[in-house]
Amino acid sequence: MIVSKTTLSGVRVIDPRVFPEPRGWTFETWNAARYAAEGIPSVFAQDNVSYSLTGVLRGLHFQHPNDQAKLVSVLEGEIYDVVVDVRPDSDTFGRWVGVMLSGENHRQLWVPEGYAHGFVARRPSIVTYKVTAPYDPASARVVLWSDEDLRIDWPGSDPLLSEKDASAPRLREMPREFLPRVGNQR
């Protein structure tokens, strides 16, 4: 596998080694020793799968204080996946990185604790994510996907949103006690 750093500390793009053969292909989606060597924890608390129609935008979600890291993959379809640094004491606070993940490129995205995560489906998509902490409704936070301070260059227009995502606060409106800090991550 090839692991690439991004402009955000700890956020990684993983291109697994794919083994094509006449019947199709195979690849490892997870190997504790290999991923640990890249700084990705070997203990996950929960696996999630979502299905999104074309144009669905989910995010920007994170958890605090029960912080959660994610390893995101697409089984089918294509998403534009975005990670935003929401740690106010970070040098990259409010900065974002976007990566195209698809069932064809098999790429994965590692989202450490302290970052908000969201994606827009470019076509019907099945997305999986391994998370390091279970979903905790009391810790669930969301930042407005279209926050003009963030200037995220989302592909497409007029996304399909949940009510929660559509009415989320901008990052600057988020109470500071709802935001993680550098070094608070496990």
Image (spheres, rainbow, N blue to C red):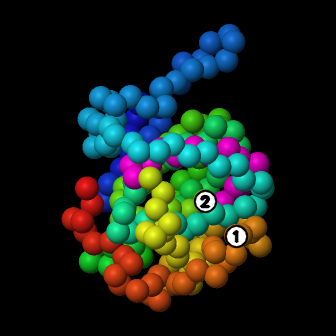
- Three-letter code, disc 1: Ser
Q: Mark 2 — residue?
A: 119
Q: Earlier in the sequence, mark 1 or mark 2?
A: 2
The image's mark for residue 100 is none
Residue 41: say if magenta: no
Query: What residue lies at 21% left-to-right and 65% top-to-bottom?
Result: 183
Q: Mark 1 — residue?
A: 162
Q: Where is 49 relative to 9, above or below?
A: above
Of residue 94 and residue 114, the one placed in the foreground of this image is 114
Quadrant position of the N terminus in the picture: top left
Of residue 179 and residue 28, the one placed in the foreground of this image is 179
Q: Position of residue 155 (x, y in %)?
A: 68, 64
- Three-letter code, disc 2: Phe
For the question of whether residue 116 can be seen, the reply is: no
Residue count near mark 2 (Cα–Cα under 10 Å), binned few <14, some 14–19, many ≥20: many
Horizontal relation, residue 87 to residue 52: left or right: left
Horizontal relation, residue 44 to residue 140: left or right: left
Horizontal relation, residue 65 to residue 160: left or right: left
Q: Main secondary structure of the magenta part?
A: strand
Query: What residue lies at 49% left-to-right and 31% top-to-bottom?
Result: 29
Give the farthest residue toward the left: 183
Query: What residue lies at 64% left-to-right and 75% top-to-bottom?
Result: 164
Q: Position of residue 118 (x, y in %)?
A: 56, 62
In front: mark 1 or mark 2?
A: 1
Query: What residue lies at 40% left-to-right and 86% top-to-bottom?
Result: 175
Task: Work out how far the residue at label 1 is from the one at label 2, CA to CA, in angstroms.
Answer: 13 Å
Element on which disc 2 rests: strand
Count of numbered circles in the view: 2
For the question of whether residue 146 can be seen, the reply is: yes
Give the farthest residue toward the top: 22
